[in-house]
Image (cartoon, rainbow, N blue to C red):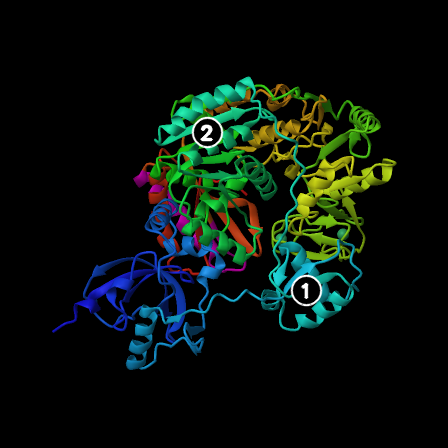
Amino acid sequence: MKNQKDDIIWSVAVLVPPYKSLAYKEPFYFPTDIWKPGLRVLVPMGRSNTLRPGVLENYAYLTVPGRLKHIHWPLEKDNSITLEFLEMIAELSRRQAVTPSRILASVLPGSMRIVPEKLIFSESGEKISLPNCSCKSQRLDELARSWVKGDLIFPPSRKNIRKIISVAKEPPWSILPNAKLQWKVMDTLWQRGEMDLTSLKKILGPSVKQSIASLQDKGLISVCDKEKSVCIESLPQKQEKIKLSADQEKALSELKPRLQAKTFDVSLLHGITGSGKTMIYIYLARVALEGGRSVIFLAPEIAIAVQLYEQAVQILGEHKVFLHHGLKSPSEKESVFESIRSSEGPLLLVGTRSALFMPVKNIGLLVIDEEHDESFKQDQGFVYQAKEIAHYVAKRDKAMLVLGSATPDIKTYFAAKEDRISLISMNNRVGKSILPEVCFVDLKVDPPKFGPLAGVSESALREVLARGEQAVIMHNRRGYSPVVMCTDCSEVAKCSECQVSLTYHKSRQRLVCHYCGQSLPFSIICSNCQGSEFVPVGDGTEKVEEFFQSNLADTKVLRLDRDSSRNPGRTQEILCDFAQNKAQVLVGTQMLSKGHTFPNATLGIVIDGDLGLGLPDYRSSERIFQLLVQLSGRAGRGDKPGKVFIQTRNPGHYCWKYVAESNYVGFFEQELARRKLFAYPPFIRLGLIRISFPSEWNQKEDFVAIVKNEAISIQRNYGVKIMGPAPAPLSKLRNRDRYHLLIKASDWHQIRKAYSALLPCTDKHRIVRMSLDLDPMNML
Ligand SMILES: [Zn+2]
Ligand SMILES: [Zn+2]
């Protein structure tokens, strides 16, 4: 007689390449009732039956022809992944056209994807190796019985004792030019932040150990033996006034009853910078928590998440409050995951976008602060838009979703105007502070004379410093100079793999490609004339900082950009120092515009307001508008009025008058008319297909021609509009040629269908990568 059990076939999402769902039988040596959807398991893969981690999805009674491998061992007794979580992953998989395996592999904490080597008898403490697939069946039976009884378990996860290496000293570094490997180590660490020894060896080879030792001797790097947990200092907080403003009272009175109705509801909280949106979030959170439901706050970046967390703890201290962000160590991430999973009552979780993948149950309120921010979209690896996931979760749990911003995404505001979501506006700042006065400085009339500053900006800066107040100066370009030019033939130094100009970083004496990260010594030979002299051209934040530091007597200047905040926690330190008045001038990139509060900063200067206007992206005006209004919002947040100077060579640009008035609605209407005219979102749906292949591939012309033909027939058959394939604006990256196809359609489904129809083109060419980005944020 056939054994019924043999016919239960599970679909297992494997958490390693090829990131697919594979079929496995239930093993004969375990009772059938231990297998449940969401359970993490080990399955054999490949000829050598190497054990890999996977997650059980669902099962069917099937008779499968041929031999099918069986699941080898469960990784846990109770499933740490709930059915709800699995269902969300499945939904995301349908929407984003990626496999559940790939999503799970990118959202589960790393320690949940580890294959343990040992089992341990709980009674005696005796350790044995995890049996492999060729183990005798009698032995497997025996061990499985002990497992089911709870006598045999996996040893508690070792605290990952790894050697973590990080940069210990800011550049310049005293390394001989010919110590190439040492340079590579420093560059790699600088690029990626801290790393463990194993990964560093993987990238740079085993001989890297020696270089590490000598760098350590010089004090340039530090090697820690254990997993370092980053301690993030919180910004000094002003005691929040308990009394709410009239605007805040009104907003709350509208939102509170809707939250208490426990139905799915989406609201846009459009409040100008400084109008006190945070207090609204916290008051609403209290209502949800007291009603027994959990809350998630998402912030666009770690510094803001930490600040929001501190405020929440201060006011809602009697409730459970968790913080999650990307700088947490793997074991901390797992411990937050585990605490949340096993938590019974309502809780508040504050974090960056990945907090959405924490297993919070029974959600009553989701808040996305600074909802216009691009960081809510992850566009590398598994591509997703946090707002979309939040929308799905809110609908599932009949929760309220609040999107807050002073400069909402055009699409969000459009949805509010069309009554698809509700709109709550707050048009006044809290307390005595008022919006700063914004002036545009025409650089053609008043050219830069004090370094990058025009006369009027210079005098404003000097006045503010004389009064003992602070200034923030934004320049959205990091490094020392964006271009270096050969003095003999004017050739611009370019990255050999991406064909974009290299940026000069003076403190490191390196030329760096900002796209692929490759770096070269500054003393290179001109590829055109063999000349050896290059001059830096143009200003980056590093040069601006240097200029002010050496030309403003008795003034301390700080810099905030990706280079100055490589080390985890450094951003927070810089912000703290500035907030505590330890420096008078803060120079930085767009990182300055992100929701920080500097009470004593009364002046904002934008060195080049035109940067980014000419980008090949339909959203470039929207981005500039948001950036400048947000930056202006940083000035005059305390009791003193603020002033903002924006320097431009383009004084007639239509954006400026709305920026000057901080007039979001006016900008929205103008921008919407433009989008309608040229058929861009929100009037249509947009999908971007990215294709890349090695630059030296000899069949590339033929391949592009095939894609082109296919695109024409898809356009004809599917009722979508396809533009391309055309070389991407960044046409070469890391030695791969890049092509784009832009799809315009009336719904997402059509775009997905068109993409699926195009995918078979790549079947015969494994070197081609093709991916779909729905509603792309980054068009390069
Ligand atoms: Zn030259
Ligand atoms: Zn490059």
Report the residue that reaches farthest toward the left: 1
Q: Secondary structure at mark 1?
A: strand
- Residue 234 in view: yes
* Nearest the eye: 623 or 687: 623
| Up-down relation of residue 123 to residue 394 (above or below) | below
Q: Is 266 located above or below residue 538 in the figure?
A: above
Q: Which residue is mark 2?
A: 412
Q: Amino acid at mark 2?
A: Thr
Question: Percent position (x, y) of residue 631?
Answer: 65, 30
Horizontal relation, residue 69 to residue 247: left or right:
left
Range of magenta residues: 691-718
- Which numbered circle lies on residue 223? 1
- Secondary structure mostly seen in the magenta stretch: helix
Q: Which of the pair 138/302 is nearer the observer?
A: 138
Q: Give x and y (percent) for residue 447.
A: 79, 27
Q: Residues within 10 Å of mark 1 (few under 14, many from 20)?
A: some
Between 484 and 655, which is closer to the camera in this rendering?
A: 655
